[in-house]
């Protein structure tokens, strides 16, 4: 009779049941979608960070930033007779420099050893972030005959060289020239780190091979697949890194389909240190903690051991992710969460009010049931059961609605941009014609005189497009349906309590 | 008194001694019953008459263990209703007292058969036995073929007969009826009265609150309640 009474009662109050169920359904769907989007944004943030810091990195340690004014700019020196003379009398000049950003601090070998030896550190690997600058250009034959001028150093600032002074004979004139400044990012990595921690942990080899321990000290490199395609690099080819000819042994791509890896070119760490002349230093140490529970403790220990360094956790790094990804995160976690909570509260309130209204309308009915021998407990269970079923109906409808919402997001696959403030420079500028042309770097801030395309940005941001997904989590679905049931139970408990408080005589009197 | 007389003398089902019931409403005290004293024997057909607001429904609710007296003694069989626990009162309502209301008080979303079955739910009877007793009760009131009808599909008299079936399905010791013919026309009233008399003849104690003198005339005893005081007519 319990089920029959319950079913008949809900069927007899279809409008009320529908309103309560719809309210709960909307609330539950919102909870599901918001949580799925929040999880998707967290995944996207992790993705954005993983490309820079790799999978498995719990903490990063970076050296203290350099003093203000320490960056005096890059000079390209050409000695007398430098360059290659062509048959038309012009001189081709080309030189490459591999350098670390003067604004970024470094950590020496002792520091790396300290980090590796800290309690709770399961793995640590260092990487040296560098930029390769290539200056190349051509100076036309000087105008006057006779005499040989001594060219003075070009600064590379605006692509003009100073006029050389003539020795004997007529004063030589500058015959014109064109120069280009190209750059690409280079990351010196420890090949033995494998894929457990660090930037290379989030890449896959698309051709050739990855760097391994045997490559230590060798002039070998792997290239990012996007950069390799743009520069027509391939396995077996070579690239000039800081004036050294480095052989490309592999092409790597990001584990994520829609983004590049952390740098254009990867070389063994000691090779990078030697070419750049930095000594045995790294710019970042990537740390994997022994367990998630240890992260905070390890972070504190590292900060204490290296007081001048900056130790950042994933949570700290997540705050550096900017762009629309950060906006989406803020919106979902802020507005989205509050909205879903408010709608849920309103839905539960609706359920409670309708239940109380139903109990009030059924005062005589409950009084009659008590008169024919029904106990308070039995009546409370009846009312609670009706509310619970309304909650279940709302939960089921909300589940379907929420799944549809998730499906829509995953079908639309919105792309949003996310940039990490500690991303590496991207180079690849092309030769610019004429002198004095300012750079039109894609990210702004490129060196004047650099070609079109992206310029060196130092500590600037590397924007990446990230596809936002809304992952399905059984836990969220179960919790959401649980919320609907809880809402029904709350309404049923309050309604049942109200029904139980009625004395049979009062109930019959009130409706008479 | 002879031994035969002692053996056939019906026992008192209800014994009221100086029963009072007061309510507090809107800051003032209302004395619905004042010192009601009476004895109702098993198998009697008793009517309680009186003016509106005289305390009739209050008395019926006290007899039906729906309420407790404020003072005095009210015995149902061997149970003192004024001091019995809520659990005991509930048991009495479930097993020994049948109630019929003026407005029928059937649950509109349940069929006649299901309404009658609701009275057996507290007794936790197996489904088969429950069905058998419900069928028997409906047959007793002449509605065996109307079990699947909703209350809205039945006439007033039929609805009241369903209510009576609900009251007797548990085989109570007493049936309390509050204006059972109040909402019925003359023909239906007679229908219901004939049924009630038949039940009484089978041994059921019947206590009916009524304004209707036609109903009162058919009772074994008539009590009058006026200004909270009970008197034999």
Image (cartoon, coloured by chain):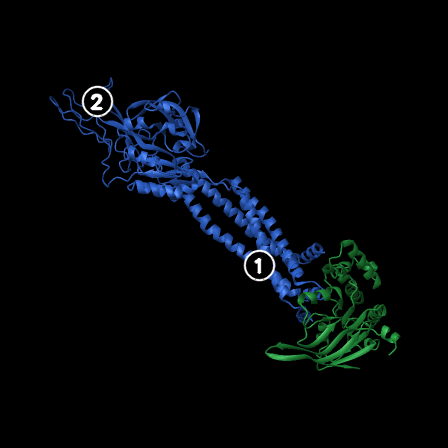
Chain colours: A blue, B green
Question: Which quarter of the rendered picture does the C terminus of chain B lie within?
Answer: bottom right
Q: Quadrant of residue A511?
A: bottom right
Decide which of B146, A325 is in the foreground and name it: B146
> x and y percent of residue B62 in the render?
71, 73
Residue linked to disc 2: A82
Instruction: Give how far apart the Cα atoms at labels 1 and 2 are.
Output: 85 Å
Residue A322 visible to an observer of this rendering:
no
B22, above or below B94, in the image: below
Q: Residue furthest left?
A: A168
Q: Number of marks in the image?
A: 2
Q: Residues within 10 Å of mark 1 (few under 14, many from 20)?
A: many
Question: Which quarter of the rendered picture does the N terminus of chain B lie within?
Answer: bottom right
Q: Which mark is residue A124?
A: none
Residue B146 visible to an observer of this rendering:
yes
User: Viewed as shown, does residue A70 lie left or right of A283?
Assistant: left
> x and y percent of residue A314 in the render?
40, 41
Give the residue displayed 52% in from the left and 46% down from the top: A33
> x and y percent of residue A146 in the render?
14, 19
Give yes or no for contact between labels 1 and 2 (Cβ–Cβ under 8 Å). Answer: no
Mark 1 or mark 2, which is nearer to you? 1
Q: Which mark is residue A350?
A: 1
User: Viewed as shown, does residue A119 lie left or right of B150?
Assistant: left
- Of the numbered discs 1 and 2, the one sitting upstream in the chain is 2
> x and y percent of residue A144 in the render?
16, 22
Query: Do the residues at pointers 1 and 2 share their chain?
Result: yes
Give the residue displayed 13% in from the left and 24% down from the top: A166
B203, above or below A150, in the image: below
Q: Quadrant of residue A507?
A: bottom right
Decide which of B141, A149 is in the foreground and name it: B141
SS assignment at label 2 = loop
């Amino acid at each position: 009779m319990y089920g029959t009474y319950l079913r008949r009662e809900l069927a007899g109050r279809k409008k009320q049941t529908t309103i309560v169920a719809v309210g709960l359904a909307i609330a539950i769907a919102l909870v599901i979608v918001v949580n799925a989007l929040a999880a998707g944004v967290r995944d996207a943030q992790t993705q954005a960070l993983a490309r820079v810091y790799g999978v498995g990195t719990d903490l990063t340690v970076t050296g203290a930033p350099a003093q203000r004014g320490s960056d005096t700019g890059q000079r390209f020196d050409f000695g007398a007779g430098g360059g290659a003379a062509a048959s038309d009398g012009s001189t081709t000049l080309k030189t490459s420099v591999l350098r670390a950003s003067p604004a970024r601090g470094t950590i020496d070998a002792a520091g790396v050893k300290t980090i590796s030896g800290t309690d709770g550190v399961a793995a640590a690997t260092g990487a040296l972030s560098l930029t390769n600058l290539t200056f190349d250009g051509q100076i036309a034959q000087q105008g006057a005959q006779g005499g040989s001028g001594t060219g003075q150093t070009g600064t590379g600032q605006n692509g003009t060289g100073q006029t050389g002074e003539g020795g004997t004979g007529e004063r030589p004139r500058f015959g014109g020239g064109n120069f280009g400044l190209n750059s690409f990012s280079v990351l010196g990595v420890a090949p033995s780190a494998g894929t457990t921690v660090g930037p290379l942990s989030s890449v896959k080899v698309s051709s050739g091979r990855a760097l391994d321990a045997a490559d230590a000290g060798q002039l070998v490199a792997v290239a990012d697949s996007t950069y390799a395609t743009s520069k027509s690099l391939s396995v077996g080819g070579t690239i000039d890194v800081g004036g050294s000819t480095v052989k490309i042994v592999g092409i790597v791509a990001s584990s994520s389909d829609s983004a590049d890896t952390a740098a254009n070119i990867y070389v063994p760490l000691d090779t990078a240190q030697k070419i750049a002349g930095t000594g045995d230093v790294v710019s970042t140490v990537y740390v994997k903690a022994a367990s998630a529970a240890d992260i905070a403790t390890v972070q504190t220990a590292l900060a204490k051991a290296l007081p001048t360094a900056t130790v950042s956790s994933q949570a700290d790094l997540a705050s550096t992710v900017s762009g629309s990804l950060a906006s989406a995160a803020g919106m979902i976690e802020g507005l989205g969460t509050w909205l879903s909570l408010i709608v849920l509260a309103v839905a539960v309130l609706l359920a409670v009010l309708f239940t109380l209204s139903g109990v009030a309308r059924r005062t005589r009915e409950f009084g009659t049931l008590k008169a024919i021998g029904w106990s308070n407990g039995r009546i409370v269970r009846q009312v609670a059961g009706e509310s619970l079923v309304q909650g279940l109906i709302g939960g089921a409808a909300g589940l379907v609605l929420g799944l549809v919402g998730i499906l829509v997001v995953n079908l639309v696959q919105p792309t949003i941009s996310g940039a990490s403030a500690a991303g590496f420079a991207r180079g690849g500028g092309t030769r610019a014609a004429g002198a004095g042309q300012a750079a039109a770097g894609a990210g702004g801030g490129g060196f004047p005189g650099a070609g079109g395309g992206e310029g060196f940005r130092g500590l600037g941001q590397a924007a990446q497009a990230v596809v936002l997904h809304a992952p399905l989590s059984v836990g969220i679905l179960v919790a959401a349906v649980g919320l609907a049931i809880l809402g029904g139970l709350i309404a049923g408990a309050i309604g049942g309590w109200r029904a139980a408080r009625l004395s049979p005589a009062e109930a019959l009197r009130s409706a008479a | 008194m002879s031994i035969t007389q002692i053996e056939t003398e019906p026992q008192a089902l209800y014994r009221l001694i100086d029963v009072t019931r007061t309510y507090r409403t809107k800051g003032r005290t209302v004395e619905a019953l004042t010192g009601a004293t009476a004895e109702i024997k098993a198998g009697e057909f008793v009517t309680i008459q009186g003016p509106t607001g005289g305390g009739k429904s209050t008395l019926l609710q006290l007899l039906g263990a729906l309420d407790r007296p404020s003072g005095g003694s009210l015995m149902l069989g061997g149970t003192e209703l004024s001091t019995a626990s809520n659990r005991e009162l509930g048991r009495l309502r479930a097993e020994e007292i049948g109630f019929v209301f003026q407005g029928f008080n059937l649950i509109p979303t349940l069929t006649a058969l299901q309404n009658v079955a609701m009275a057996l739910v507290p007794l936790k009877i197996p489904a088969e036995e429950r069905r058998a007793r419900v069928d028997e009760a409906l047959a007793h009131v002449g509605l065996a073929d109307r079990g699947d009808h909703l209350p809205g599909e039945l006439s007033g008299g039929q609805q009241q007969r369903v209510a009576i079936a609900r009251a007797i399905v548990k085989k109570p010791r007493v049936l309390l009826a509050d204006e059972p013919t109040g909402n019925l026309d003359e023909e239906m009233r007679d229908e219901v009265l004939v049924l009630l008399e038949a039940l009484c003849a089978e041994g059921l104690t019947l206590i009916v609150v009524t304004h209707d003198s036609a109903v009162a005339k058919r009772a074994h005893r008539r009590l009058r309640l006026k200004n909270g005081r009970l008197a034999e007519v």
